[in-house]
Amino acid sequence: MPTTKSADSNSQGSEGPSITERWESAFVYAFITRFTDLKKKIPTFNTPIDLEEAILSPGSNPLIIAVLERFLKNLSPTCDVRQQHLEQTLRSVVAFYCSSKERSIWWKSSQDANFSPLNTNNLFFSSSWETKLEVLRQLVEWQLTNCPHVKALIDNAWGVKHHHKAKEGAAIAPPTKTKKSHTQNSSKSPDEIPTKEILELVPLGLDSSRIRYWITDDSPRIWSSGNPWKSKMPMYSVSSSRPEYLSVIEKLKEARPKMEGKKKPTKLEAGHETLIKSLEERLPRVDDELNRVERVLKRIKDKELAAARAAELVQLRETRTRAKRRVDYAAMENDGGSDDDASSKDGNDTDSSYGEPDDQTTVRTSRRTSRASSTGLTSSSVGIKRKPDADAEWRGERRSSRLSKGQYQLDGSLADRSQHGDEHSEEAVERIAKSKKRRIMSPEQSDDSNHASARQATAENGRWSPQDTLPIPTDDDRFPDDSSLSSISDSE
């Protein structure tokens, strides 16, 4: 039977057989599909070709990492399978099982012991694909004999029940009422429990040339081999796609033995016909599996395209968005002040622009002036607060010279200002009070006697009294007009 090899399953320059000619790849893949749920959890893991490509890939591979994590957890549930410690954990588990007397594929008869192919100089992910395949095969064999979960599935599928005898003299505990379960994992339904037909790996059929055909799942992959009980059994991949699958069926039909007058076919001839019929019956399931894989790959591709489109939109949005800059208001105020100074200089140089400021300059200057006046800033130094004079001394409350004869109140004391030439201040006060037309107080409070008494008390005490009733001074009283000042100078 001619063999077909996948283009991706090369031997990477190795002189030995390729990975499609090694039965270990089919053995490892069959164990993964029967005793684990990695195919359901990893969307990109659908066919044996995916496993072969992962083993052939240099360095670490996500699929191989997931497979190693599951295998190591089955062999040592408490081990650390984090990616940064995966190599060290794998070496420790392999060294532990190699230290036992159970023979492995690395058994040395001369030393009567196993040896580990992994060490600090020979790491798993930097090894050749042959070493990777051997390690995976040995991990599968150790799980079949040492993993409690795997052994429980096998015992349940074959109907094996273990009856442990109690020790002599030991008290027998009464039976507890528990729900009946088909396996240790009660979360699985009876339909999901693997049966003997599912777990067992047997050839699909035998042709007239005694060539055995193997399948591991519903994919179109078919292996062919000789007698599996021989020490060296080459295994070839004869189909990896639907056209190749149909080609295998046509070749088997062409190689069908002829019935030359025989009434009853031989065992090999009957097996040949049975093999053709089995392959044809599997064709609908193969199509369903191919359609499922196609939908999964299309979904993955759509997600990748959506992620790429989202990345392009983010990049485009970042390109069109204005840069975020922090506004420096102090610099803006300084720039505004310099512009005003420049405009004022230009106004002094030219007569046409004098007295006619720009609209924007006027608005900016008025805004700055109002803000400076409210916050205690000067127009010449915007943004700088006025510093109080440290040597300044509080002078006390100043009384109007027209009401207190020019005297100041300094912490309760009086100071006469007659020496400054304010001799006629009392006359000026009386004249301004009489000529005042606007009064804030009521007419009853504006009696002449009350004003006279209030002025007399103020002149004598130099301070206000609660009993004093005087009109509230206005701006006209504090700042007399020119006529009042001229009359005062004339009287002098």
Image: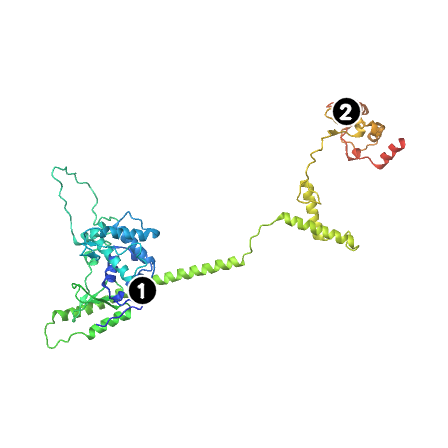
- Of the 4 image quadrants, the one containing the N terminus is bottom left
Give the x, y percent position of residue 40: 30, 56
The colour mode here is rainbow
**Viewer can see residue 220:** no
Q: Is residue 292 above or below residue 454?
A: below
Crowdedness of circle 1 by 10 Å Cα count: few (<14), some, many (20+)? few
Q: Is 265 drawn above or below residue 192 in the view shown? A: below
Report the front residue among 177 and 255: 255
Work out how far the residue at label 1 is from the one at label 2, CA to CA, in angstroms: 111 Å
From the viewer's perspective, is 200 left or right of 364?
left
Query: Type of residue at label 1?
Result: Asn
Q: How many marks?
A: 2
Query: In the drawing, what numbered circle is on residue 291?
Result: 1
Q: Which corner quadrant of the image does residue 379 belong to?
A: top right
Tell me where residue 358 appears, x and y as whole percent. Answer: 72, 53
Q: Residue furthest bottom?
A: 260
N-terminal label among 1 and 2: 1
For label 2, the SS is strand
**Does the image show residue 340?**
yes
**Residue 136: quarter of image:** bottom left
Dot 2 amino acid type: Leu
Q: Residue at x 28, y 63 (%)?
A: 48
Residue that badge 2 annotates:
414
